[in-house]
Image (cartoon, rainbow, N blue to C red):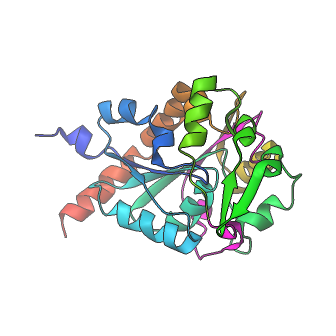
Amino acid sequence: MKSKSTETKPSIVFCHGIWADGSCFNKVIPTLQAEGHQVIAAQYGLDSLASDVATVKRTLGRVSSPAILVGHSYGGSVITAAGADDRVVGLVYIAALAPDADETSQGQQDKFPRTDVFSYVEVADGRAWMLPKGVECFAGDLSEQEKKVVWATHFAPAADIFNHGVEGTAWRSKPNWYIVAKNDRTVHPELERFAAKRMGATTYELESSHVPMLSQPKFAIDVIRTAAKAVQGATASKAVLASGR
């Protein structure tokens, strides 16, 4: 039987960016599981923002306690919308986009200098593929072997996915945390700082490429752990209310 403290710990639902899937969180998931959190990665198809948000909401139904959404890159746009769900108690952004109600992911990026990775993108069959040389801009601080795996498993989004918008701006009402990757060549670090400041996030900066959860997983775990402890009371309250229904 689970202890009461384990039952009321928030669940962690991971939301990946483009050129990735849920496996990009494989260095942080085991520790969080060992600490008693239910953990699941939402595996969405990068076909449209609306369908990806819908997948996250379905995934929230697969965990038994209120959840923290963790969004990387474009996953930040996903959690900004999906996080409006009542089952979400907090948001963690990792080198992520975080559009406002009147913005798209592309509109937010257009306000900042174009990053290097977009020089290594090829559109084919309606999808935006990252060319092999683009991995250096995406995950430059990983080992050569890891970079090859990142490229081999990269998942191409619909070419127009950044132009989609959906309702919901969860960072306006939910507590949030943000990891700024200072050496990011995929999402501009100044965009990250702007987004974090605008949402009033508890903000951390580190020397990292676009993928700190792979290059510095202990740091990412510490931030998620901090967020989980901060929402512990809200999680317990929601669990009690749910049990009384």
Residue at the extreme top: 143
> Magenta stretch containing residue 66, yes or no?
no
Residue 235 at what x, y percent from top left? 35, 51
> Would you place residue 97 above or below residue 12 in this image?
below
Q: Is residue 90 left or right of residue 168?
A: left
Residues rendered magenta in the picture: 158-187
Location of residue 60 (image quadrant): bottom left
> Would you place residue 28 above or below residue 120 in this image?
above
Residue 83 at what x, y percent from top left? 50, 63
Q: Nearer the viewer, residue 142 or 94?
A: 142
> Magenta stretch containing residue 168, yes or no?
yes
Q: Is residue 118 left or right of residue 215?
A: right
Location of residue 62 (image quadrant): bottom left
The residue that appears at 31% across and 63% down in the rendered structure is: 61
Q: Nearer the viewer, residue 193 or 233?
A: 193
Q: Is residue 65 left or right of residue 211?
A: left
Q: Quadrant of the C terminus?
A: bottom left
Residue at the extreme front: 125
The answer to whether one can see residue 153 in this image is: yes
The answer to whether one can see residue 227 in this image is: no
The residue that appears at 66% across and 50% down in the rendered structure is: 96
Report the predominant secondary structure element of the magenta stretch: loop
Q: Quadrant of the N terminus?
A: top left
Residue 52 at what x, y percent from top left? 51, 66
Number of marks in picture: 0
Residue at the extreme right: 113
Q: Nearer the viewer, residue 19 or 70?
A: 19
Location of residue 203 (image quadrant): top right
> Would you place residue 102 above or below residue 200 in this image?
below
Residue 116 at what x, y percent from top left? 83, 44
> Would you place residue 221 above or below residue 104 in this image?
above
The residue that appears at 32% across and 55% down in the rendered structure is: 237
